[in-house]
Image (cartoon, rainbow, N blue to C red):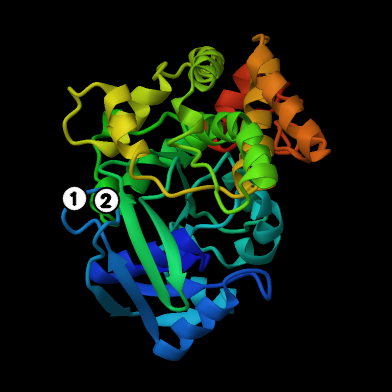
């Protein structure tokens, strides 16, 4: 297939390499300029492709003790021109921070074509922005997590540390799920999942994004550790997964926040899947394992940091994730004390109003809809007309 990857950061670069390695014709589009990864992008342009250290060759995750051999994949196109990158592609995969979805949609959605699969990874219901600015009729898909965990290690080279065994998807409108899965299942093995594991609609995918819980709680609990190290041990940095997510406080918060999320899922007619069970499904072939044990095994192989509380784990996943969760809870008349407390505390630390910045049903243009009409819209893509 012809695949356009939008976003030349960690995830986009890794997926561009892996798609090319799988035999797809890959175009890579960089949409930002002089913000991040410009040197990396220019190196790929010069090389006409991308180098990768794929440490998952012998398993789906690694402790990076011994790096794999660096290999190279040529790419069909590496460009900053959205028109030439998108037109004629079978699949468009968007790997950018969700905070930029609305602005990017205004720039590129006009190039989407009928029946093209446009996948947002992750989504947080951002496909609604692209739908708003699109004149044609593509199939939108939203993922919950990137197919792999990767880091750019030098200009032109990405290292893959972890890959998911399975990745659930949702589609907008949900009525095109069967069409969308027929295309998505050919991308990567992780997307070749049974139809009963495909999400009912984009809000279900949004709430199963693991970062909505693990990043927000992990960083909040890590905050005093970061402050302490900055003052007393400036040459050291704590590990969010290893240190913050080893505390009883973190897991008490996770349990409370997860319970609120599952109450919203239930009210939306979706299955209540706990956070750890959803992680097990993504990460392991053997689903009989203890989900907490699997999480602990990944935690020990995770990289250090983040190095600052002012990080996308907070500045993206609080306003785009937690605020959306709170907005859905409010619409459904579900009490969300843990969610609201975390939003307010994180915003207070950074002196930002994440409610004002955040993604809500109102910012998505759906605030006036009843619950019934909201679900009808995500299923059919049409706002019901009342007589």
User: In the visual, does 191 lie left or right of 139?
Assistant: left
**Mark 2 and mark 1 residues within 8 Å of each other at the beta carbon:** yes
x and y percentages locating residue 91 in the rendered image? 40, 61
Identify the residue at image location x=18%, y=36%: 285
Which class describes the residues within 10 Å of circle 2: few (<14), some (14-19), or many (20+)?
many
Identify the residue at image location x=68%, y=39%: 227
Name the residue at the front extreme. Answer: 232
Which class describes the residues within 10 Å of circle 1: few (<14), some (14-19), or many (20+)?
few
Q: CA distance from mark 2 to mark 1?
A: 7 Å
Q: Nearer the viewer, residue 25 or 352?
A: 352
Q: Of the residues tagged 2 and 1, which is closer to the observer? A: 2
Q: Nearer the viewer, residue 246 or 340?
A: 246
Visible residue check, residue 90: no
Identify the residue at image location x=56%, y=24%: 375
Question: Is label 1 in a helix, a strand or a loop?
Answer: loop
x and y percentages locating residue 245 in the rendered image? 47, 29
Quarter placement of the C terminus: top right
User: In the visual, does 92 lie left or right of 322?
Assistant: left
Name the residue beneath numbered marker 2: 62
x and y percentages locating residue 143 in the rendered image? 44, 44
Identify the residue at image location x=39%, y=45%: 302
User: In the visual, does 121 lie left or right of 370?
Assistant: left
x and y percentages locating residue 33 in the rendered image? 67, 75
Quarter placement of the N terminus: bottom left
Name the residue beneath numbered marker 1: 59
Q: Is residue 146 above or below residue 351?
A: below
Toward which corner of the image does residue 232 lie, by quadrant?
top right
Question: Is label 2 in a helix, a strand or a loop?
Answer: loop
Q: Is residue 216 above or below residue 135?
A: above
């Amino acid at each position: 297939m012809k695949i356009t990857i939008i976003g030349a950061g960690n995830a986009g670069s890794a997926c561009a390499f892996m798609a090319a390695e799988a035999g797809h014709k890959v175009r890579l589009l960089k949409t930002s300029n002089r913000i991040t990864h410009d040197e990396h992008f220019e190196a790929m342009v010069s090389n006409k492709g991308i180098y990768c250290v794929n440490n998952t060759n012998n398993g789906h995750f690694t402790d990076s003790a011994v790096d794999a051999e660096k290999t190279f994949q040529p790419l069909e196109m590496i460009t900053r021109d959205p028109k030439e990158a998108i037109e004629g592609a079978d699949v468009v995969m968007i790997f950018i921070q969700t905070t930029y979805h609305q602005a990017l949609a205004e720039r590129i959605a006009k190039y989407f074509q009928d029946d093209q699969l446009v996948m947002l990874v992750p989504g947080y219901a951002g496909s609604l922005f692209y739908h708003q600015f699109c004149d044609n009729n593509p199939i939108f898909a939203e993922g919950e997590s990137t197919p792999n965990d990767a880091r750019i290690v030098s200009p032109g080279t990405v290292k893959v540390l972890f890959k998911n065994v399975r990745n659930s998807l949702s589609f907008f409108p949900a009525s095109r799920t069967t069409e969308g899965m027929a295309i998505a299942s050919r991308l990567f093995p992780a997307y070749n999942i049974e139809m009963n594991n495909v999400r009912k609609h984009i809000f279900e995918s949004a709430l199963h994004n693991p970062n909505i819980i693990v990043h927000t709680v992990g960083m909040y609990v890590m905050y005093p550790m970061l402050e302490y190290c900055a003052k007393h041990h400036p040459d050291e940095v704590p590990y969010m997964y290893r240190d913050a997510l080893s505390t009883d406080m973190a897991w008490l918060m996770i349990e409370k926040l997860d319970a609120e999320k599952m109450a919203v899922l239930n009210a939306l007619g979706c299955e209540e899947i706990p956070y750890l069970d959803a992680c097990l499904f993504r990460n392991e072939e053997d689903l009989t394992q203890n989900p907490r044990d699997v999480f602990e095994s990944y935690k020990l192989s995770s990289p250090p940091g983040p190095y600052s509380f002012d990080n996308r784990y907070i500045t993206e996943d609080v306003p785009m994730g937690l605020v959306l969760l709170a907005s859905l809870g409010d619409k459904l008349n579900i009490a969300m004390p843990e969610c609201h407390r975390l939003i307010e505390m994180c915003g207070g630390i950074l002196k930002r109003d994440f409610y004002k910045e955040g993604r809500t049903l109102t910012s998505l243009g759906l605030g006036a809809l009843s619950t019934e009409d909201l679900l009808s819209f995500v299923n059919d893509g049409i706002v019901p007309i009342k007589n």
